[in-house]
Image (spheres, grey):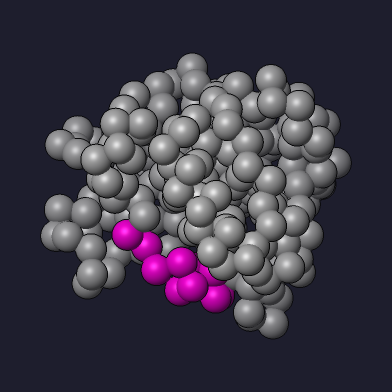
Amino acid sequence: MVPYKLMYRFGLAPWEWRDVEETWRPILDSESGLEPGRALDVGCGSGRDAVYLAKRGWRVTAVDFSEEALATARRRATEQGAEVEWVQGDVGRLDRLELEPGYTLIYDFGCIQGLGDPSRQRAAAGVSRLAAPGASFLIFAFKAGRHIVLPRGMDQADVVALLGGMWELEHAESMASDHMPAFARRAKPTVYRLSRRDGTPTV
């Protein structure tokens, strides 16, 4: 497992090299864009996405295990006048956080890809239990492999194997950009968009 607390303490969080506005523009601003509702940020890090969505009218719950990351996230929200529910906890144990099901949008930009297999399975089960029927799930991952400073990653086949029973893969889009270091671009950062199958029983 990636030592997230240590990485945040030393300012190394490669999953945060994304352009947040560019990430969300096609999802929110297209003709079929998502309407504001309840959103769950799984592994919120420094809160960039949570604050951005809150300012766009979403009711955001943001979960992270790292005290350092959450402290930065709270400062960001205060500075930008955004209201977010911050929750410290293990994303592999979402069932223990007393979160209310019914999120219409769930997203993970770098957390689940760094977990061991048992924690990945628990995180996927927790996400599925908390999602509303037809909810959207965005998950960011580098390609699977042995990386020096990046998480172990997930390929599309890994994403489908982890979530395919409850979710349908709709789209996969590269997040590589010129402002990323070359080693990060080579790791093929990708965002996968899935929708929860209507009528699927919660677990």
Point out the stretch of residues depicted in magenta: 17-26
Quadrant location of the N terminus in the rendered image: top left
- Residue 195 visible in the picture: no
Residue 143 falls in image quadrant: top left
Residue 92 image point, x, y percent: 55, 24
- The residue lying at 14 percent from left, 60 percent from top is 182
- The residue lying at 73 percent from left, 68 percent from top is 57
Residue 139 image point, x, y percent: 50, 48
Residue 20 included in the magenta stretch of the image: yes
Q: Residue furthest bottom?
A: 31
Residue 126 image point, x, y percent: 66, 29
**Main SS of the magenta segment?**
helix
The correct choice, above or below, for 98 with respect to 183 in the image is above
Residue 9 included in the magenta stretch of the image: no
Of 117 and 20, which appears nearest the observer?
20
- The residue lying at 63 percent from left, 42 percent from top is 86
The correct choice, above or below, for 4 with respect to 45 in the image is above
Of 57 and 135, which appears nearest the observer?
57
Of 56 and 133, which appears nearest the observer?
56
The correct choice, above or below, for 76 with respect to 94 in the image is below
Residue 66 falls in image quadrant: top left
The correct choice, above or below, for 198 with respect to 48 in the image is above
Quadrant location of the C terminus in the rendered image: top right
191 displayed left or right of 93: left
98 displayed left or right of 29: right
- Residue 71 visible in the picture: yes
Q: Residue furthest right?
A: 199
